[in-house]
Image: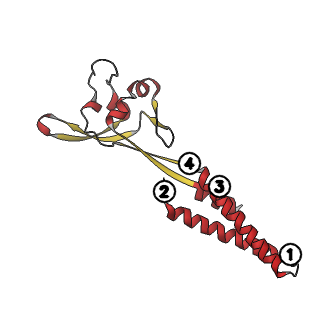
Amino acid sequence: MRGVAIVLLAGCAVRTTTATPSQLAAHAPAFTQDGHAELVRSTGNVRVSAEEQVTVRLQEGDGLQRTATMTVRELVDGCNLDGPDQGCLARRAVEEPVLRHRERRVDDDRVVKLVGFSAIGGLVGYCAAECQGDGDLERGFAYTAGFIGGTLLLGFVAIMIGGRD
């Protein structure tokens, strides 16, 4: 059971998605009508709520800017895909990432790697126990479990050091 918990913990990935005001404005109808929008990303679509808070820098006259915190719905309210905008704040915002949406999920690829690591460790432990030749079941189980645990831990550390999404 602990092994399953370790595999799932190591398989957990945090994916951060960013979006600029113009990218959010492109989904204005979905935010105002449905209360959420689906942002298309190469790593997978991300569902963003219209009530999510963003901090933007709004262009005022003569190169002045002011910082404001608001919901995505307030930012894209009045943004039209066709025709003139009606008070669209997203069009006056500085074009920089304003949304940092964090999503936690289990990464299947990581889980498969860890299961593979532990299976290899189990085979090595089993072979080490069989090479002893004395037929001691307890020692064989201890070797196998020890090698599974060791390679699982090694895989966990390798994946965590190897980088994040």
Query: On the image, numbered disc 2 is attached to which residue?
Result: 164
**Sequence order check: which comes first, mark 2 or mark 1?**
1
User: Which element is circle 1 on?
Assistant: helix
Query: On the image, numbered disc 1 is attached to which residue?
Result: 137
Whole-number angstrom distance, CA of label 2 to CA of label 4: 12 Å
* Three-letter residue code for mark 3: Val
Give the vertical position of 150 relative to 132 (above or below).
Answer: above
Whole-number angstrom distance, CA of label 1 to CA of label 4: 39 Å
**Sequence order check: which comes first, mark 3 or mark 2?**
3
Please tell me which residue is depicted at 68% across the width and 62% down the height of the picture.
3
User: Which element is circle 4 on?
Assistant: strand
Instruction: Please state which of the two labelled residues, at mark 2 or mark 4, is closer to the viewer.
Output: 2
State the colouring used for the structure image. Answer: secondary structure
Decide: marks 1, 4 in contact (CB < 8 A)? Answer: no
Instruction: Please state which of the two labelled residues, at mark 3 or mark 1, is closer to the viewer.
Output: 3
Crowdedness near tag 3: few (<14), some (14–19) or many (≥20) residues, C-alpha within 10 Å = few
Residue 142 visible in image: no
**Sequence order check: which comes first, mark 1 or mark 4?**
4
Q: Picture quarter containing residue 96? A: top left
Decide: marks 3, 2 in contact (CB < 8 A)? Answer: no
Whole-number angstrom distance, CA of label 3 to CA of label 1: 29 Å
* Three-letter residue code for mark 2: Arg
Please tell me which residue is depicted at 53% across the width and 62% down the height of the picture.
160
Residue 26 position within the rendered picture, expressed as x and y whole percent measured from the top left? 37, 29
Query: On the image, numbered disc 3 is attached to which residue?
Result: 112
Whole-number angstrom distance, CA of label 3 to CA of label 2: 16 Å
Please give the label number shown on residue 105: 4
* Most distant residue in the top direction: 83
Decide: marks 2, 4 in contact (CB < 8 A)? Answer: no
Q: Nearer the viewer, residue 162 or 9?
A: 162
Please tell me which residue is depicted at 60% across the width and 52% down the height of the picture.
109
Whole-number angstrom distance, CA of label 2 to CA of label 1: 40 Å
